[in-house]
Amino acid sequence: MKQHPKDERTLVVIKPDGVQRGLMGEIIRRYENVGLKLVGMKMLVPSERHVEAHYTLDPNWRRVTGEKTIKSYREKGMTPPSEDPLEITAKILANLKKYLSSGPVVAMVWEGAHAVGIVRKITGGTEPLSSDVGTIRGDFVLDSYTMADTDTRAVRNLVHASGSVPEAEAEIPHWFKQEELTDYRIIHEEILYDVNLDGILE
Ligand code: ADP
Ligand code: MG
């Protein structure tokens, strides 16, 4: 059965810096404000193994993230740390394992129309230096690839958000058991999705 677009789900993880910076409420508020529905949430300290498995669920992640880093350096007229995308991501992955397992994170599943795309838009681009103003990564943090590479660490950008629907479909079961997600109706949906708007007037 084909799902209705409003039933799309995505994974968001508030990374350890988001928790430490006291931004949990602000981050949740932004996804809530747009009309998305929170269907699962928990705090945990992920193991390095869990983090590595999370990032390598998508077989293309190593190549794509390496290429994205090289492109960003070039656009700034700078020389990337390596010409080999896989060499770049091997380092990124090692640093990401340290970053994400350094303290508690908050994992969440959000549901609603175009949940994946809407959450990415609100979250902003990967590198805070160039993330748009108005996004979480653009408004609340100031890191860059150069900063991260100079200090041999991961870019600190407050949140993880699934990059595509297939990525979300692979990531959600990696973080949540079926019974940890709740199917329920929220009153907002009557206005967001009701076709006839015939339930308002007495
Ligand atoms: P996104 O989180 O926006 O989907 P990626 O999937 O490409 O970004 O990368 C995963 C995470 O790895 C990023 O959020 C960031 O924390 C870190 N990261 C990505 N590229 C680099 C880099 N060049 N140097 C350091 N850390 C990086
Ligand atoms: Mg990603």
Image (cartoon, grey):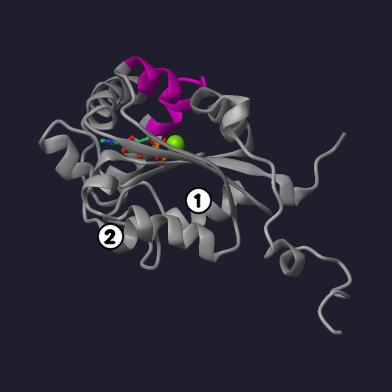
| Rendered location of residue 76, percent (x, y) | 26, 52
Q: Quadrant of residue 183?
A: top right
| Rendered location of residue 115, percent (x, y) | 61, 50
Secondary structure under badge 2?
helix
Relative horizontal placement of residue 160, taking residue 201 as reference (left or right)? left
The residue that mark 1 highlights is 120
Q: Dividing the image into four equal quarters, which quarter contains ligand 2?
A: top left
Tag shown at residue 140? 2
**Distance CA(mark 1)–CA(mark 2):** 15 Å
* Residue 132 visible somewhere in the drawing: yes
Q: CB at mark 1 closer than 8 A to ligand 1? A: yes
* Residue 131 visible somewhere in the drawing: no
Identify the image quadrant of the C terminus.
bottom right
Question: In the image, which residues are magenta?
Answer: 49-65
Residue sitting at x 62%, y 28% = 179
Residue sitting at x 43%, y 18% = 53
Q: Amino acid at mark 1?
A: Arg
